[in-house]
Image (spheres, grey):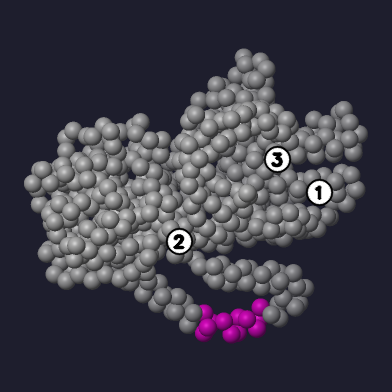
Amino acid sequence: PMQGVVQVQTYRFPAINYGSRLRVTGFLETPPEGETFSYRLYLARQGVHSLMSLPNVTVTAENKGNRLYQAIFSFKSRAQTTIAQLIPEPQAALLTGILLGNDNGLPPELDEAFRITGMTHIIAISGFNIAILVAILVRIAEPFFSRRGSVVFALVGISLYTLLVGADASVVRAAVMGSIYLIANRWLGRPNFAFASLFLAGFVMTVIRPFTLWDVGFQLSFAATLSLMLYADPLTQWVRRRLRRVLVREWVEQVMGVLSEAVILTVAAQILTLPLIIGYFDQLSLISLLANALILPVQPAVMIWGGLATLLGMILPLVGQLFAWVAWLFLAYTIWMVRLFAAVPGAAIPLTVSATGVLAIYGVIAAFTWLGMQPDEKRSRIMTAVRQNISQRLLVGASGIMAVLVLGWGMSQPDGQLHIVFMDVGQGDATFIQTPSGRQILVDGGFYPSVLNDQLGRLMPFWDKEIDMLVATHPDADHVSGLIGVFERFRVKQIITNGQSFGESPIYDEVLTAAQAQNTEIRPVQAGEIIEIGDGVRLEIVHPGPVLDSESRNENSVSMRLIYGDFTFLFTGDAEQGGEGEMLRRERPLNALVFKAGHHGSNSSSSTPFLQAVQPQIIIVSAGVDNRFGHPAPEMLERVAAIGAVVLRTDELGSISVTTDGATMWWQAGSVR
C-alpha cells in the first residue's frame, strides 16, 4: 500500500474533530507548478506531495487519537468558544489569534491592516508571546517551587502551550529558545548562552525536519531573534549616548525605559527580518516603527487579562466577564491603532526584490555589522578609505539605479493594445485582460490562490494593487477558490456574477464576503446587457437569462463576448450543452475569432451546433496536466477538428497570451506577455 501525506481540502461544515478516523474518497492530484512560484515544492517542504479537493468524507470512528492531544485540542476548542462568548468581534478574533494562534476569524480588511502596518507578528505566535508566557509561568511558580522546580513548571507549561497553538516551525523555535534560556539562566546559571541556544534550536529542528529550513515563519523567527542578539545592546548604548548629550541623567533612564522595548527592540529585530519580508511579501511598511512603538507596550496586558478572562470564563463565566471587559479595552485600542495607521496614505509601498537582491542586502548588512565590531581606530581607518573612493562610484551607481527604475516604469505602461492571457493555473480557469489604456479584468481565479498570485505578479507591475473588474462566472471551486487571494492582495472595484448569492458553496460565500468587506460593487448580469469598458472595448453578456437553472451551476455560467475592433473573444465559463442550447435559442450573435472552450474542453460542452454558430479560428482549453477528468475530451477535440479550428491547451503550452490592436492578432505560449 502507498503511504504519505495528502493535503485534503473539504467543506468547512460539518466540523471534524481530532481523533476521528476518516474514509476519504477522491482523486489524488499533483500540486501545480507556477512559473515563478512552485506550489509543488512549497508543499514538498512540508512533507506533502499530493492534493485531494472536495472528496467524499465519511467518519468511521471517533476518539481514536492520542489522549493528551485530544485533551489539549478539546481545551482549545472550549477556550475559543469562551472567548467568543465573552468578547465581541473583531476583538474576540484578535484575542484568539494572540492566545491560541488561530487568526482565521479576523475580517479581511483588518488582516490587511495588520499586514500594512507590519504588526502581524503580534497575531502569529512567536518569541514575543513565548517570552511573556515564560515570565508569567516563572512568576506563578516561584512562591510554590524551588528555583529549579519553577524551571520544570515553566518547561511543562511551554510544551503544552506549543502543542495547543499548533507547533509550527516558528512556535517550536521560540519554545526551544525559551526552554534553553530557562535552563541556561535559571538552572545552570549561564545567562550568556543566547547564541548557542539559538543555533542549537535551529540545528535540532532542521535535523528532525530538514524542510523546516525553508519555512518562511521559521526564517523570520530565527532572523528576528538573531537580530535582537546582535543589535539590541549596541543600539541601546548608541541611543543612550545621544540622549546624554541633550538630557540630564535622571531623564535619560526614564526615556530609555520607554524607548527600549517599544522602539529600540523593534528596530533591532527588523534589521535582519526586513529583507526577508520584502523578498517574500513584496511590500515595505513605512509606518511599522511608529505602529510598533504605540501598540507593542499593551500586548502583555492583552495576554495577561485575555488569558485570565478565558480561564476564569470556563469556570466562572461572570467573573471571567469582568476580566474580559479589561482585556477588551486593550484589544480595542490595538485594533483602533492598527486601522488608524493603515489608513495613512503611503503607509506601505509595494517593493519587489529578487532572491539575489535579498542576498545582496544581507551582504551589505554583514559588512556593516563586521565594521561595527572592529576597534575604533581600525574602523576609523576603514571609513576614511571608503569616503575617499565612494563619491564617484555612488554617483554612477545612483544614476544606474535611476535608469533601471525609469526603464521598468516605462516597460510597465500600457502599449495601446488589448492583451488577453489565459493563465496556466492547473485544473482550473483564470484569464487576465488588459485594455489598451491599462484597465484590468480578471475572469475567474482557478483553484489555488498562491498559483494565481504568482501569475498576476508577473503580469502586473509591483506597485499596481487594483483590479478594475472581476468576473466570477459561477461558484465552482476550480473557478473561484483562487479569488480569495486576490481580495487579500488587491483592491477590486467591481465583481460580475451570474446572480447567484450566498449558499451556493462555502468557497463562493467567502469570495462574496471578501467583496463586501472591501465595499466592492457586486453586479449580477444577464443576457442582453452590454458593459462598456472603454478604449473601444465592450462586453456583451450572452448568458445566463433572467431565470437560472436551479439544477446546475455550470449551466448558469456567465458567458460573454469581448469585442475590440475587428476581433471578438467568447468566454462561456463551464457552460455545457444545456447552456449552449439556451444561447443558441436566443439567436444573439455568438461568432468569435477566439473561443475559450467551456468546461475545460469536456465532452459535455462545445457541441457541434454551438461550434458552428461561433465559427472560431482558435479554441483555448484551460486544463491541468494529467488531470483526472481527461480534459480535453477526445470527442470534443474531434468536433473542433471537424470545423478546422486550432486548439491551444494550457496543459501542453502553459500560459497563452493573445494580443491585438483591433486589426491584427498574434499569440504566444509559455509566456504571460
> Residue visible at 68% across and 33% down?
65
Q: Does the magenta segment cover residue 472?
A: no
Q: Secondary structure at mark 1?
A: helix
Residue stretch in magenta: 383-394
Check disc 2 and give the amino acid type: Gly
To which residue does mark 2 refer?
34
Quarter of the rendering containing residue 20? top right
Judging depth in this view, the residue of 661 and 69 nearest the camera is 69
* Image x and y of residue 343, in percent: 42, 45
Q: Nearer the viewer, mark 2 or mark 3?
A: 2
Question: Looking at the image, can residue 125 be seen?
Answer: yes
Judging depth in this view, the residue of 261 and 105 nearest the camera is 105
Check disc 1 and give the amino acid type: Ile
> Residue visible at 33% across and 71% down?
411
Q: CA distance from mark 2 to mark 3?
A: 33 Å
Q: Residue furthest left?
A: 587
Q: Secondary structure at mark 3?
A: helix
626 sits to left or right of 575: right
* Image x and y of residue 64, in percent: 67, 31
Q: Does the magenta segment cover residue 384?
A: yes
To which residue does mark 3 refer?
162
- Pointers 2 and 3 in contact (CB under 8 A)? no
Above or below for 35 versus 65: below
Quarter of the rendering containing residue 432? bottom left
Check disc 3 and give the amino acid type: Thr
Mark 2 closeness class: few <14, some 14–19, many ≥20 residues within 10 Å: some
Question: Looking at the image, can residue 261 be seen?
Answer: no
To which residue does mark 1 refer?
180
Q: CA distance from mark 1 to mark 3?
A: 15 Å
* Image x and y of residue 491, in percent: 35, 48
Q: Nearer the viewer, mark 1 or mark 3?
A: 3
Q: Magenta span: helix, strand or loop, mainly?
A: helix
